[in-house]
Amino acid sequence: MRAYRYPPKNQRKAVIFYLHGYGSYAQANGSLAKYLADFDFEVFAIDQRGFGESEGQRAIIEKTEDIYNDQWLLIFEAIKKFKINQQKTPLFLFGRSFGGLIATNMTDSILCQSMFTGICLLTPYYRLWTDKLYTHQPLLKLYRCINPHKMIPGEFKELPPEMEAKWGEKYNDPKADCSFTVTTGVLWAEEQARALESIQKCSLPLLMVEAGDDEVIRNDYLEQYFAAAGKSAQARRSCQPNQYLKIPAVDHTTVCFETHAIRSLVLEMVKFFNKLIAEKNTRKDYL
């Protein structure tokens, strides 16, 4: 498994564990991690199995347990290897797209909610723009028993010429692989169905980020899930309210490429996390 570390510019203020999107890999969004490191947040990430520089057959997900186990392995290994004192150093989760879906479901555990101080979800993969994946679920489940690794053509909206000219190299990154299998399609829908319950129970302070022109996922589902998370506010340890951020004039991909979008995202993340760090330090001083 290929792992990455982005050390803080000066002294470690807190640690962020980043989960990349489906078909992508950690370094594809390395600029986000580098910006966060400039604010003294130490960032760790891995390329998920079958993606980027990690081993495994390309775009093959055997079972979701592998994804969660690999993320937890990264967390525990980083804490051990880099001597991260959990009593003094706040830990944060940062999930992007499919990684945001996984991060949401990771919070459905006492371990996660006791270890982490907050979470940021960037364009989380709660619902695809097309309903075909969901209407064909019975057929996909049946087909999974026959040929679980059969590749299914992705259904993506055509890239406008001006976007192709500006970001074609990024969209056509040879390390990225957005193809998926019958098994993957079934797992996506299962994890998405689970996410609403997970976020309702999440007691971690939450920053939800929407790309205003997203045409991969449905932003109305982000709003719905965010509202559901707010219902558990009384259970949260923090006094800070959850926050919803909309970044205009960017889509699901360019939200990580456009300079103004990256700057807006990082500044809001830093502001949100800094408040949680200050609150955590205040509680320590009080105790």
Image (cartoon, helix red, strand yellow):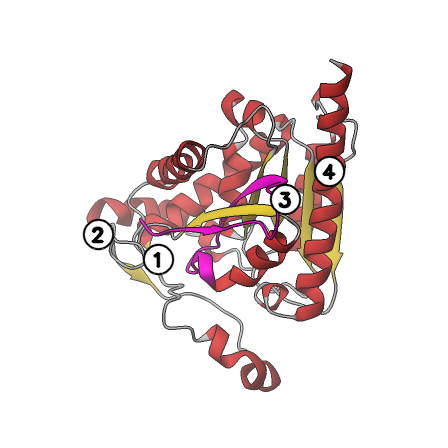
Please report whichever mark, 3 or 1, sits nearer to the chain's N-terminal start: 1
Q: Nearer the viewer, mark 4 or mark 2?
A: 4
> Tag 1, which secondary structure?
loop
Q: Which residue is mark 1?
A: 51
Mark 2 residue crowding within 10 angstroms, few (<14) / some (14–19) / many (20+)? few
Kind of residue indicated by mark 3: Cys
Q: Which residue is mark 3?
A: 120
Q: Nearer the viewer, mark 1 or mark 4?
A: 1
Q: Which residue is mark 2?
A: 147
How far apart in space, not on screen, are marks 2 and 3 (Cα)?
Answer: 36 Å
Q: Which mark is residue 227?
A: 4
* Image point (53%, 72%), residue name: 157
Nearest the eye: 231 or 55: 55
Residue 110 screen position, x and y as percent: 53, 21
How far apart in space, not on screen, are marks 3 and 1 (Cα)?
Answer: 22 Å
Residue 233 screen position, x and y as percent: 74, 27
* Image point (73%, 40%), residue name: 274
Kind of residue indicated by mark 2: Asn
How far apart in space, not on screen, are marks 1 and 4 (Cα)?
Answer: 33 Å
Please report whichever mark, 2 or 1, sits nearer to the chain's N-terminal start: 1
Viewer can see residue 126: no
Nearest the eye: 141 or 168: 168
Magenta residues, start to end:
1-27
Q: Is residue 152 above or below residue 229?
A: below
Kind of residue indicated by mark 4: Ala
> Tag 4, which secondary structure?
helix
How far apart in space, not on screen, are marks 4 and 3 (Cα)?
Answer: 15 Å
Nearest the eye: 34 or 136: 34
